[in-house]
Image: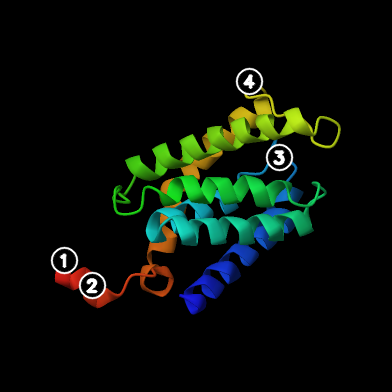
Amino acid sequence: MIKKYFRALLILFGTVIVESSILSNIYVLPCVPDILLIFTVYLAILNGKTFGELSGFGSGLILDFFTGCPMGFNTLLRTLIGYIFGNFHKKVIIGRMFIPMVSIGFATLLKAFLTWLITIFFPLTINQLNIFSQKFIFEFCANIILAPIFFRFIGYFHDALSTENIQDLKDNV
């Protein structure tokens, strides 16, 4: 499991680099789609609560180092999201289009709600997120559109990232 976690952490690190250096410099976009959220949710659904928490914690920690947010904000936010979506392990089959779109839409709304909830306790340090703003609506739509594409892409690495033993999967069939 440790090897698979480090592989996932490497993918999440690469995603943060792409998101913070390349996508943030495209000035046509009103805001950056949260590809890191998509990968974190995928890993949580694929491997369960513990792996979801660990990948959420790792991705949030990396994001805190790369962004100007207060240290621990993204770590807390993404750890909670990883745990929540890790509860859907073995309960939801990652499909081609519908499940990724619904799960990422819900995750984006959950991220906005948790951000709002955290800003109640720390009002001066974090900008509040308005769910009716143009930036949030663009991020929400972009995340939903990109979700099936990235779920399909990372599905090619399923064996390298899944913590379940392949023999256990064959025995259940």
At a point 52% along the width and 51% down the height, the residue shown is 82
Which is more N-terminal, label 3 or label 1?
3
Q: Secondary structure at mark 3?
A: loop
Return the x and y of residue 125 as percentages of the image width and height: 84, 37
In this image, 19 relative to 164: left or right?
Answer: right
Of the two numbered discs 2 and 4 on the same chain, state the one appearing first in sequence. 4
| Mark number, residue 168 | 2
Q: Which mark sits nearer the N-terminus, 4 or 3? A: 3
Q: Amino acid at mark 2?
A: Asp
Image depth: mark 4 or mark 3 in front: 4
Q: Residues within 10 Å of mark 2 (few under 14, many from 20)?
A: few
Q: Quadrant of residue 120?
A: top right
Label for residue 172? Answer: 1
Q: Residue at x 51, y 39 (%)?
A: 107
> In this picture, is 130 found above or below 37?
above
Q: Specify few, some or many for label 3: CA neighbours under 10 Å numbering under 14, 14-19, or 20 or more.
A: few
Report the Cα–Cα distance between label 1 and label 3: 48 Å
Real-space CA distance between mark 2 and mark 1, rounded to the nearest whole angstrom: 6 Å
Instruction: Give above or below for 164 relative to 94.
Output: below
Q: Nearer the viewer, mark 2 or mark 4?
A: 2
Are the residues tagged 2 and 4 within 8 Å (C-beta)?
no
Q: Tell me if 76 is positioned left or right of 105 in this view.
A: right
Is 92 positioned to the left or the right of 65 in the image? Answer: left
In this orientation, which residue lies closer to the viewer: 43 or 79? 79
Q: Where is residue 76 shown, x and y percent of the image?
A: 66, 48
